[in-house]
Structures are given as structure tokens and as C-alpha cells.
Image (cartoon, rainbow, N blue to C red):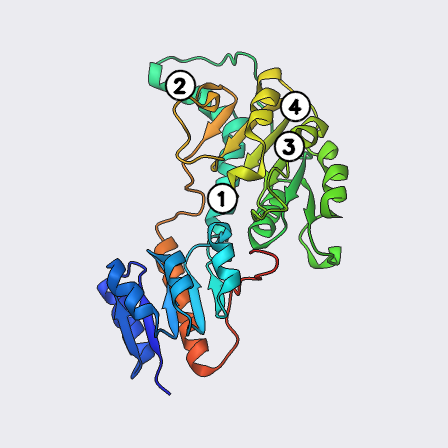
Amino acid sequence: MSVKLLITHDLTPQQLEQVRLTAREHMIVYTQERDLALAEARSADIALLGVFAREILETATNLKWAHIPWAGVDSLIDAIRKTPAVVTCGKGVFDAPMADHVFALLLTLTRQINTFLRYQIAGVWKRELPNASLTDLWGKTMGIVGLGNIGREVARRASVFGMRVLAVKRRPAAISEEPVDGLFLGYEGLRLMLPECDVVVITAALTPQTRYLLGQNEIASMKKGAILINVARGALVDEKALVEALKSGHLAGAGLDVFEEEPLPPDSPLWHMPNVVITPHVGGLSERTRQRVFERFLENLQRFLAGEPLVGVVDKEAGY
């Protein structure tokens, strides 16, 4: 039986040709025009979503499978839950660059690279560090909030740096199956883990249950002088409470790739804090990201046409 594939995600001519070769006799509609996309969505069986993702999910009542190229689906979860289609996403595709980015932020803070860059720009040879000192990671404890694919990659890198690695996750798992030294479960586990950690890394998914997962009380329970790294979603952390903890010195620093409001507003105090490193939500990017994103879709297209299980299926109940 012939199927119809609607594509609104941006593809190169070479990638589109690979899709045509894989789909063979099946119909492909590639467009980024809203009216045409929504009209074609009504009879589409498969969708590779880019622009108009929400509207297509709400319009395509015959959809059997939809693929979302990015990993976080929190902004679309209500539409995902309503569609009868199986929905897959890019989770797992961005693990390596995201884990690398965690350590780029962390080492910038522990080795005071941000301060030395300011000296370099000023053309000053200076070793003094106002209100800070150089430190290393060996023997320190890292706590990972959200031990999914990205969290596991972070844990493996932390182990190589000689760190003791703890993690908290939502579902029970045997510690022998995870690359960590200690495993905690749920919110109570989070409260037990935080005071032990020199570094806390957030890689959890954003859901209604995890919004402000690290609020004022949780941040206050962290070890004095700890560092917070967030590469997941800004709304997982109470930003006002974080700013206060950084100002007071309770936290030594923060490396932030994500924020409650993006772009980060010009009047945010985070911009001007010397113990904060900011990047503009680029943690998952790499010169190879675009090809990896496409390869995930192409693999799933082959699987769908062969009647095989898909990779990266979104758990509609969990929200990721």
C-alpha cells in the first residue's frame, strides 16, 4: 500500500534525493509553505516535521508516524498526546556534543577561562583571580539530574576526569547497568543527592512535574561553593533563586546554555555576573549535527516501511 510522506523540515537536495530513493514508489510532498503543508497534512501518513509542527500534528488526522528532528518535545507535548500517530524525536542524536558542552562550561569555570579571556582581550599578563581560584575535578563529586542518554554521556566523561558520579532518575534501574557510582530515585532522591555534590549537571526533560525542579529550597540545599550546569531547559531551574545563590556566594558559579526566556533578556543580571558562563542554547550543535539528525529520520523511514520498531519513540505519558 502506498503511503504519503509530508516533509516541512529543511533538507539539502542530496538529503531529499536519499529520501526519494528510500521511499521508492511512495509519494513525497516537500514544502515550507504553510497553506500547502496544512492541506497536504490531512491525507499524510508520515510527517517529517520542521515548520508548522504543531499545526500539522493537529491537522493530520490520518497520520501514522511523525518525526520531530530535535530532542526536547516539551513545547509540543499537548499536540503529541492528542495525535494517534507514533511520534519519534531526535533524542540520542545530540548526546555527544551536549556532554562535551557540559565540560566546556564546567572547565571554563573551574579553570577560570572566562577571566583569563578578559585579560587576553585587554592585553594583560595577569595571574591574579579576584574572588576566585583555580581548581581541578579529580576526586570531586558530580550529581547528574536526569540520567537519560545525555546524562550517561556526561557520566562517562566525568569518570574519565576522576570524578565520583551520582545521578537521580525517575524510574528504578540497577546501578550495575548505569555508568555511575551512586543512583537516587525521584524527588526524594534529588534532595538526598544535592548536598553531596560539588557539581550539579541538569540533563532532565522539562515536563509539568519537573518545572522549577531546582527551586529556592533545592538550591539552598546544595553544597556551599558548588557549581551548577544546565544544558537541558531553563525552566527546570528557578532563575531568580539561582541569581540570589550566585550573588550570595552560596554557589561558586553556573554554566548555562538554556534559560527560562530565550533569548535571554538584556536586563537579566546573569549577563554581568563574573561567576556565570552563558552560551545561547548551542549545546547540541556540531558540524555533524545536521547529518546525524537526518540519518535518524532516514533510519526510521526504512524501519517504518519495513514494519520494524522505530528508534527514539516519544513516551507520551512521560512527556519525552
Q: Report the amino acid beneath label 3.
A: Gly
Q: Which mark is residue 225?
A: 4
Disc 2 vs disc 4: which is toward the camera? 4
Percent position of residue 224, x then y: 69, 23
Q: Secondary structure at mark 2?
A: helix
Counting other residues with Cα less than 10 Å from the Cα at mark 4, is it few (<14), some (14-19), or many (20 or more)?
some
Q: Secondary structure at mark 1?
A: helix
Q: Residue furthest bottom?
A: 1
Q: Report the amino acid beneath label 4.
A: Gly
- Above or below — where is 293 with respect to 137? below
Q: Report the amino acid beneath label 2.
A: Arg
Sequence-first tag of 2 and 3: 2
Q: Quadrant of residue 239?
A: top right
Sequence-first tag of 4 and 3: 3
Sequence-first tag of 1 and 4: 1
Q: On the image, numbered disc 1 is attached to which residue?
A: 100
- Above or below — where is 85 with respect to 213? below
Q: The C terminus appears in which quarter of the rendering? A: bottom right
Q: On the image, numbered disc 3 is attached to which residue?
A: 215
Counting other residues with Cα less than 10 Å from the Cα at mark 1, is it few (<14), some (14-19), or many (20 or more)?
some
Q: In this image, 310 relative to 40: left or right?
A: right
Q: Which mark is residue 118?
A: 2
Q: In this image, 82 relative to 36: left or right?
A: right
Q: Are marks 2 and 3 in contact (CB under 8 Å)?
A: no
Counting other residues with Cα less than 10 Å from the Cα at mark 3, is it few (<14), some (14-19), or many (20 or more)?
some
Q: Are marks 1 and 4 in contact (CB under 8 Å)?
A: no
Disc 1 vs disc 4: which is toward the camera? 4
Sequence-first tag of 2 and 4: 2
Percent position of residue 15, x then y: 28, 66
Disc 2 vs disc 3: which is toward the camera? 3
Residue at coordinates 52% horizontally, 22% vertically from top-left?
275
